Image (cartoon, coloured by chain):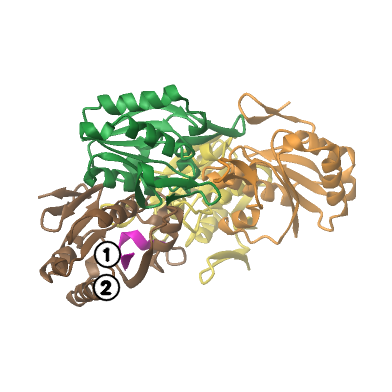
Chain colours: A green, B brown, C yellow, D orange
């Protein structure tokens, strides 16, 4: 069984038509798994629905705590891309892997709701890597997988690249 | 570098509006990789564009041959789901893995062009598994990965399941 | 109030993923009206769900009868494009317009469910023309509106054009 | 021939993936006409690409001027919904209709680029109404058409309704 923790990010941004602005409602992850005909046993929990630029130390502590207390040892976290590396570091510094846990963070550059998202591709990727990688904290983006301390987001290109 | 061999299948079916019927034109795989913001080094070749129910022994021999001569040791094959297991068997019987090759077959239940496909999810999954699995022949569908001799397609549910 | 009679056609074709073939399930028209934020008072009835190439004289008689008995004088009929002109002729020959009725037939070249349909555009067009045209039988396709005896479908281009 | 003047609005908003925000690039109107298999003779000009809340008196004067100088007597204007009524008023006060011109303004509540837009429906509707209505200034939204002084946007529901 895989634990899937939802924290928001571009993955789950929607268009609020009355405000004419981007907003969060509820996560699209269950719909994405249905669309992907995913037959993995996935237990989903929404921890927060925020832009990762708005994520506080307390929010990160909550993610670390939830990963720590998870009975499933394989965990995927959906997360905004801007501070994904920071949260990965917080998880690594909390020694999540020592408990035998494999945590893979993933996200999207385009909201799933906007019809042209990399989210479905990344979700398929993250759920695959998490099944086979050794305990540790990883980031799966752009079809690639990086250990938490070997990656940065290139803000010019929007691409995650090796350090 | 990853080799990606295209053979057609539901993955690449389109709607021909003049005929009012399903048809193959050219593969959507490059567009899907772009949409997925994939930054893997992928070398694509289209071997054929057919329904896997129409696949002959000669077609399978061609797939085996292309996998055998591939300089890349990590290979993804997109394939119709109906006879995917059969092609996987042909690859295994040709001892592809002995050459140190990891081959992952994947496909889709709904054409990518119809906007609600599992193809993007499966492609993300197959490209991830192929990077980390030991030499062998595998099928990646529904978020799961099976060795070639441990899987069948359940034709009632459309789901790939363990034997 | 507008009467909307559904007869199937490409408009409502879907992809049946177990059969790997095109099929009809139920009409997408209500969903399309919702998506179009349509606020017209529309009363929908599904008369049949068939390819217009399979439409029999009895089927056409049924459409004529339903238009005749409709209490609403403004009627849109969704219809396969291949024999749309034939049904329009049947309606005209039954002197539908004499009862003060405006009937607009419309359809699509690409199924709505395949994400790139002209159906939504045509539906907006047909529902607009039907509100303002004099009693008669018309075909609304490609942004244009033709009286029933001034139009043919060009099977090479898939476009409706004036005679 | 129909003149189609683009001014931006929700119709043309896109998601900028590097900024993670909504933005304007270029208009989607030509693509929408292609998707709708529109075969009307439409001459498109982009006057501006702005949110209608940012539209100044000078911008409105420009729209009035372009409608006035248009050699085509049938004109569709795509426009943000928030101040669409205001621009319609400016056109009416400039006595556009006296020159024999029929102007129909339309827009969308959801960006076309976000895959679930009312824009395609509204565009089909506006292009249909403009062909048959008498000279005047109109707003086509939600499948309905209003004369410029008989309509308001209900900001709670996002729906255009009769005064």
Q: Nearer the viewer, residue B101 or D71?
A: B101
Image height check: is A163 above or below A74? below
Q: In the rendered view, does B142 fall on the left or right side of B46? A: left
Q: Residue at x 79, y 34 (%)?
A: D86
> Which residue is identified by label 2?
B70
> Which residue is identified by label 1?
B75
Mark 1 residue element: strand
Q: Residue at x 62, y 34 (%)?
A: A20
From the image, give the main secondary structure of the stretch colored magenta: strand
Protein chain holding label 2: B
Q: Quadrant of the N terminus of chain A?
A: top left
Image height check: is A60 above or below C140? above
Question: Are the two marked residues, 1 and 2, in contact with CB atoms closer than 8 angstroms?
Answer: yes
Mark 2 residue element: loop
Protein chain holding label 1: B
Q: In the rendered view, does D140 fall on the left or right side of B150? A: right
* Residue range corresponding to the magenta coloring: B1-15
**Residue D73 is drawn in which quadrant?**
bottom right
């Amino acid at each position: 069984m895989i634990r899937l923790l939802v924290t928001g990010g571009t993955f789950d941004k929607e268009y609020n038509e009355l405000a004419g602005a981007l907003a969060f409602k509820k996560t699209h992850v269950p719909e994405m798994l249905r669309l992907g005909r995913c037959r993995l046993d996935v237990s989903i929990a929404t921890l927060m629905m925020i832009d990762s630029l708005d994520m506080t130390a307390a929010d990160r502590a909550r993610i670390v705590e939830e990963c720590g207390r998870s009975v499933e040892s394989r965990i995927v976290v959906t997360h905004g891309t801007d501070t994904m590396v920071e949260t990965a570091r917080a998880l690594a510094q909390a020694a999540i892997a020592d408990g035998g846990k494999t945590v893979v963070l993933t996200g999207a550059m385009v909201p799933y709701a906007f019809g042209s998202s990399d989210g479905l591709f990344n979700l398929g990727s993250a759920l695959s890597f998490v099944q086979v990688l050794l305990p540790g904290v990883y980031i799966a983006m752009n079809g690639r997988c990086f250990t938490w301390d070997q990656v940065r987001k290139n803000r010019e290109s929007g691409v995650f690249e090796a350090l």
